[in-house]
Image (spheres, helix red, strand yellow):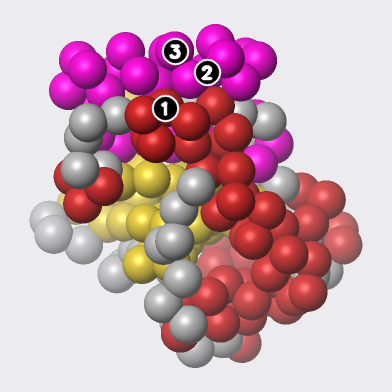
Amino acid sequence: LPPEETKQAVAEALKAGYRLIDTAQGYQNEEGVGAAIAESDVPRDELFITTKLTNSEHGYDKTLAAFDGSMKKLGLDVLDLFLIHWPLPMFDQYVETWRAFERLLADRRVRSIGVSNFEVPHLQRLLAETDVKPTVNDLLTRIVGVALVRHRAVNATFTGNEIHRHPQAHVGIAVAAP
């Protein structure tokens, strides 16, 4: 959506009581989201804002610069959740990118960091080579069937995804499947 239409849609959502706003650099709507937040009467501490790193901005320095761009568009000092949108293993930069995420967390520029669309091997490598565990893995899924595993992880059958065979890979990582 163009910025003005995004602003209007988000403003209406806030009026209706929505408090979680999920956007992404790749959606090209952060400017409209930021404008709606700025004009809203909803106190910032009642909102939870998520954005995702676009695929072309992987790598330590590029990630930090892209984050600064998002913050300017959103008009925020601190982001609630920043996600790597896709691991893109063919470029082998998601670990370096995650280290930039860890830096943003340490600098208190973001409250929480996570990943999106990571499969088991990507998570295993990230956990082995970095210091901070992702708080969430936001999955693009086509759910075939879902069963809860007590207080530990989600065990589901996802089309084209190995998560159902390895729920232990997500222990301590929230799984979001909108």
Residue 20, percent across and down? 30, 36
- Give yes or no for contact between labels 2 and 1 (Cβ–Cβ under 8 Å): yes
Q: Secondary structure at mark 3?
A: helix
Give the number of callouts. Answer: 3
The amino acid type of the residue labelled 2 equals Thr
Q: Name the residue type under label 1.
A: Ala
Magenta residues (range): 1-27
Q: Determine whether 148 is above or below 77 in the image.
A: above
Judge from the rendering whether residue 3 lies leftward or rightward of residue 47; answer left or right.
Answer: right
Question: Is residue 30 rendered to the left or right of residue 78?
Answer: right
Magenta region includes residue 12: yes
Residue 85 locus on image (x, y percent) = 62, 48
Q: Earlier in the sequence, mark 3 or mark 1?
A: 3
Please report the residue visible at 64 percent of the width from the left and 61 percent of the height from the top.
Answer: 68
Q: Is residue 166 visible?
A: no
Residue at the extreme right of the image, as rendered: 91
| Residue type indicated by callout 3 | Gln
Percent position of residue 33, x then y: 48, 31
Q: Residues within 10 Å of mark 3 (few under 14, many from 20)?
A: some
Q: Quadrant of residue 153?
A: bottom left
- The earlier-in-sequence mark between 2 and 1 is 2
Residue 123 visible at all: yes
- Give the distance between the C-alpha atoms of the residues marked 3 and 1, in whole angstroms: 7 Å
**Residue bearing mark 3:** 8
